[in-house]
Amino acid sequence: MVTDLIWHDNADEIRPKLRRPLLLMAFEGLFDAAESATSALGMIRDRSESTDIAEIDPDGFFNFQETRPIVSLPDDGVRKLTWPTTTVTTCQTSDERDLVLVTGIEPHLRWRTFADQIVEIARRTGSEMVVTVGSMVSMVPHTRPLAVTGSASDHELAKRLNLDLPSYQGPTGVIGVINDRVHRAGIPIISIRVSIPHYVPAPPNPKATRALLRRIQQTTRVQTGYEDLDGDVVEWQNRVDSAVTADDEIREFVTQLERQVDSNEELLPSGEDLAGEVEAFLRERGNDDEAPDSDDG
């Protein structure tokens, strides 16, 4: 019996109303360079009809000496203690699909059990697919579009969406564990991640957040409002340009990165092709398998 996953009283009312939802997930930590991934999901939440319906109890998953609870004093003067809780939020959109967002801080402990909570959330909400969203520092220049790459453990899904199969070998993080657990549970899962210039690692990075939001919109056909970041991207680009121009060594290094990136192709297909293949895959899977029961349990 799952005890770490706490459903709010409103969950039974909201879950059945979700229309063919997809579950999107991002955590603060290693897979959230410049806080670009969590910022992207935060923007989706803020522009949607969003409701928190569940949380994962942090008590068994965190070393509170590393990630401490926060004490605050709101306007009413009553002391408030906030724990590093993982939150489950539904986003009911004006598009054909709704979204389920899972956000929080990357847990320290019991990763297998934590991943099982993600599987349970996907099943209870009837999510047809899980998408992990991340950002990683990389050898890329800030002057070029920041590439969003993707992978999938399922061979058929990877082939359909022109994604890589996971090829990394070595120590992994909680996202790797979640990917394995969700895949073994028979739920389609893909990972998308944006590359962050390693010489500009500090948040915010609106260019990276915009790239993720654009790709999420292309994948899900849910409007993310990525265009709202156009002005912030221009300001960010100008600030970084000024800093690079003032240093001859860095300027030459950026030029080398530009040559390297210009010789590579983006790994994901075009937006319309990607969205079409996602829809086709899920429709075919729905015809072959019994659809998840969002009211189960």
Image (spheres, helix red, strand yellow):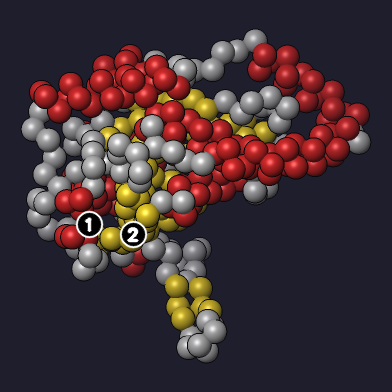
Q: Nearer the viewer, residue 111 or 37?
A: 37
Q: Are marks 2 and 1 in contact (CB under 8 Å)?
A: yes
Numbered label tally: 2
Residue drawn 65% across and 48% down? 204
Q: Residue furthest bottom?
A: 77
Q: Camera-side residue: 179 or 207?
A: 207
Q: Position of residue 14 (x, y in %)?
A: 22, 57
Up-down relation of residue 268 to residue 98 (above or below): above
Circle 1 residue = 14
| Mark 1: secondary structure | helix
What type is the residue that disc 1 sits on? Answer: Ile
- In the rendered view, does 176 fall on the left or right side of 249? left
The amino acid sitting under disc 2 is Thr
Foreground pick, 160 / 115 = 160
Disc 1 crowd rating (10 Å Cα; few below 14, some 14-19, many 20+) is some
Q: Residue at x 25, y 20 (%)?
A: 280
